[in-house]
Image (tube, grey):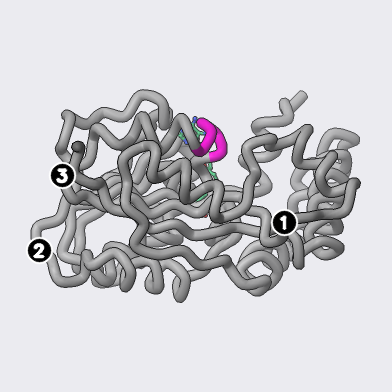
Amino acid sequence: MVDELELLIDLHRDGERQGPGGADQTRLALDLSGLREKTGLKIADIGCGTGASTRVLAQDLDADITALDLVPDFLAGLTDQSQGLGLRGRIETEVCGMDALPFAPGALDAIWSEGAIYNLGFERGVSEWRRFLKPGGILAVSELTWFTAERPDELNRHWAEHYPEVATASDKIAVLERAGYALLGYFPLPEACWMEAYYGPLRARFPDFLARHENSNEAQALLVAEEAEIALYERYAAYFGYGFYVARVGTTP
Ligand code: SAH
């Protein structure tokens, strides 16, 4: 029997991305970061999946990029999908947990992480990762965010159970400030980053996925759970989504 994690990896490994986002949004965050003007950058893309954001960074920047993820299959996908693109920067992949990064203190000009820091928790992630950044280094992360001060009970209950750290952008920005960052910019991801860029292609892979697993109960159960997540998003997209936060390491007082 294939376990649930293996199924999840099998469902996602052929995707261009494993979470909501888009190349335009990665580029908007890059514009806010000021990194475009710099050369010889050292950057980590944490929880990179198959590398949707990594490729944009490598296209646009003069940088050595270490792309890290816990799942070797996703990193293999990153390498396959990056063939022949004529990238300006260089990508190295590393199988690694985001709680055990292989960098020396102050080694990085930037940490990038789209739709992944929740695995560690936002507050823990931004404070633990800070020490790997140079003074003035850049943190760019997308994170589950409330877009309104009040929400329907069903939605509050859902995220209280699944990700209690969800908060409004102003609360997330306060977390960043307490952890020693100065905010450079924030923007919410548009719905297209969820529906067209992520859930649409994911749904299109359902039939092949079911066929590969001969309609097993486990495979069907996973797709039921995915559909429930999509339905929740479609119903409540006005209230929550991903916020993209770009911040700079401030000077310590
Ligand atoms: N940044 C990618 C993937 C987002 S999905 C994108 O936007 O498409 C979240 C990613 O985090 C997955 O690739 C998953 O394998 C990875 N991940 C989950 N837990 C992790 C951990 N503890 N350490 C490193 N990566 C992890």
In the rendered image, which residue does mark 2 sit on? 39
Q: Residues within 10 Å of mark 1 (few under 14, many from 20)?
A: few
Residue under the image location 48 percent in, 34 percent down:
123
Are the residues tagged 1 and 2 within 8 Å (C-beta)?
A: no
Residue under the image location 27 percent in, 45 percent down:
66
- Alpha-carbon distance for marks 2 and 3? 16 Å
Nearer the observer, disc 1 or disc 2?
Answer: 1
Judge whether residue 204 is colored magenta. Answer: no
Q: Which is more N-terminal, label 3 or label 2?
A: 2
| SS label for mark 2 | loop
Between 188 and 205, the one nearer to me in the picture: 188
Question: Residue 182 location in percent, x, y?
Answer: 32, 52
In the rendered image, which residue does mark 3 sit on? 135
Say which amino acid is labelled 1: Ala
Q: Residues within 10 Å of mark 3 (few under 14, many from 20)?
A: some
- Magenta-highlighted residues: 118-122
In the rendered image, which residue does mark 1 sit on? 149
Question: Residue 122 location in percent, x, y?
Answer: 51, 38
- Judge whether residue 203 can be spotted in this image: yes
Residue under the image location 65 percent in, 74 percent down:
192
Nearer the observer, disc 3 or disc 1?
Answer: 1
- Alpha-carbon distance for marks 3 and 1? 34 Å
Quick one: which residue is furthest to the left in this view? 40
Examine the rendered structure and indicate whether residue 209 appears above or below residue 189. Answer: above
